[in-house]
Image (cartoon, helix red, strand yellow):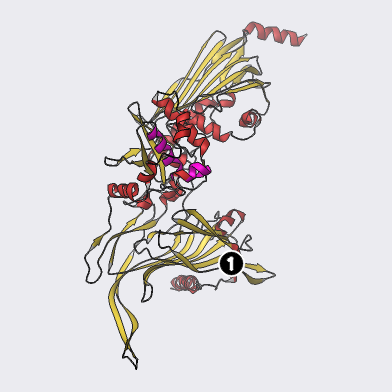
Amino acid sequence: MRQITLILSALFLCGFQIHSQNYKFGKVSKEEVLQKEHPIHKDANAAVLYRKQKVYYDLNQHEGLNLITEIHERIKIYNKEGFDWATKEIRRYTGVSDEEDLVQLKGYTYNIIDGELEEEKLRNDEIFEEVTSRYNENTKFTMPAVTEGSVIEITYKIKSPFLGSIGRTPLQYLIPMDNLELEVMIPEFFTFRRYFNLKSLLNFDLQEKKENFSYNFTSTSRSGNRVVTTQASHNSIKYMLSVYGVNRENIPPLKKEPHVENLHTYAAFIDWELMFTKFPNSMVENYSETWEGVARSIYNDLGIADELNKDNYYDEELDQVIAGLSDPRMKAEAIFEFVKQKVKWNDYLGFYPDNGTKKAFEEGSGNTGDINLLLISMLRYAKLKAHPVLLSTPSNGVPLYPTRDGFNYVIAGLELDGDLVLMDATDPKAAIGELPKRARNWQGRLLKEKEKSSWIDLMPNYFSENAIKMNYKFDGSGVEGWNWKSYSKLLAKKFRQDHSGAEQNNDIENRLSSISNIEISDYEIENKDKLGAEILEKFNFQLASASENIGDKVYLKPMLFDAILENPYKEEERYYPVYFDYPEVKTYSINIMIPNDYNIVSLPESTVVNLGEDDGQFKFIVNGAGNVIRLSSIITIKKTAFLPSEYDFLKKFYANIIKKHSEAIVLEKTLEDANSERAESGR
């Protein structure tokens, strides 16, 4: 009985401590600032101690109806790696004739100084406004006086005239969230559909209830000619509210794993889609869309069609670029390079032109919409069949329902030789058919002027290859030879991006830094600046010590510095799918010459390992004859996405690669030479 009493007392005390925490704005406690680490997630760099989001409609007789979103966040910074959470960016939508307003922004940073709790206020001169596109503005600020251990607290409201734009309400972050309160209050005039993110590992209970609500206001009327009398009348509007709520404690952070395309894709959230409105004495007005309706409205309503038909500002220059070219591919390549040289990307995303294609062309700068719509317009001018392709970048996520907000990017789709070739002129390192990683997000919507739009695959359907050839001589201890590497397609594009800076020999010494005593000479590279071409690297190398002697045996690992020795998949279990950027082939062809006075004792066993039914393959073949050993290794990854249930297969697949790449050739000196050496040593 005493033990039960103690347990109940402990639970009561724990519950009292949890619920006695004051989350009113400005009531940060000394204990919160003194906390050294998160009590559950010890490796967290920061944590959300409290987050409250309240969404409701405010009816005002002077302004009418507005959608209000209130945010209150209290965040704990544990170490320097968590400082990024002290920088905030609040996005607001600005329409043609109206815009969202950010009001009542307040922020404080709390620290312990000389044993006392002190606060530092966010000042107005620390808040900056940034226009990111024609329809979006950001308010950015970094909280003052942030150090390890700080607690920051911010609150603000967004007042929106766009009544259907509740959008997305987040339920999970990259850091732990200790307490979450969400309340969404919707009048009976609006009907929303709610979508939970089905890719999230978390389930949330969305509470729902109905409440009566009345809005009271006073109206005045005047009467009379010479003597004017004013009469006030009190009025009331009554309606039902649907109130939705989430109250949750101890929400875990998103788990970071290698080869995850975009971790936010798996965050818990709710998307709110306005289906229809029904106001008193009015007809039902539907807002639900189809993807075809969304695509058509973007094409016609946002000026894309008009931009594509303008050509009188570039025609003279473009005529010179394509003069004498009749082959469609050569025309496309010339136009593609012309646009990339003429207009530079300003780092802003968008499927519509911010500046307009003409202004972007004249000023030499634009967003993704300006540049790629200009590209499509020029391709059409050259009598090529080019179309806009709308897509969502990984950071924008995958839309759960048809909406314009489901897209934030546009590229060009060119009909060429029976295929659709995708092009993005915002990327200076891209050739035609090569998209940057930000644009490879599963599917895009192809818009044709007089045909229905359709979904197309954005992922590459071709292999990118890294081929390695190596010939070397083994002298009984060290090796000397040459190495030849080639990179094709998107692997060549990645090489150009990774080594675009001023590097000596493209940083080859650091890339081979796992071998401490290697000497590199006669380094050459071909086609590094020739976009779309295969890159070739060549160099000679020398290793003074490349083998290990155990007894009378010599052990030589033939892959040398090109072996794969570390498994990228170390975790026991996987939570999210594994993504590869593109289908890939890596081939090794190695020829080794051993001295005539050595015999081959054993070679690594040849093997073939399949990944899934037809998702990939590892082939490892070794042959030896006389004083020549030949090794071939081929790693093929065909599939670009593997489910968590397939993780063990992928992990074992790479374990097999590492095992074979680590195995050694065993050699020994011929008996006659060994006896001769022993005789020499005995004199």
Residue extent of the magenta highlight: 359-381
**649 falls in the magenta region:** no
Residue 228 location in percent, x, y? Answer: 34, 91
Residue 389 x %, y %: 37, 41
Image x and y of residue 21, in percent: 51, 72
Query: What secondary structure is found at the residue carrying circle 1?
Result: helix
x 54%, y 73%: residue: 27
Q: Is residue 265 visible?
A: yes
The amino acid type found where label 1 is placed reads Asn
Q: Residue at image x 46%, y 34%?
A: 316
Question: What is the quadrant of residue 281 in the picture?
Answer: bottom left
Can residue 512 be seen here? The reply is no
Q: Nearer the viewer, residue 440 or 605?
A: 440
Looking at the figure, which quarter contains the N terminus? bottom left
Residue labelled with disc 1: 124
**Image coordinates for residue 161, horizontal then vertical, percent:** 38, 65
Q: Is residue 91 left or right of residue 548?
A: left
Q: Is residue 29 left or right of residue 456?
A: right
**Above/below status of 183 relative to 375:** below
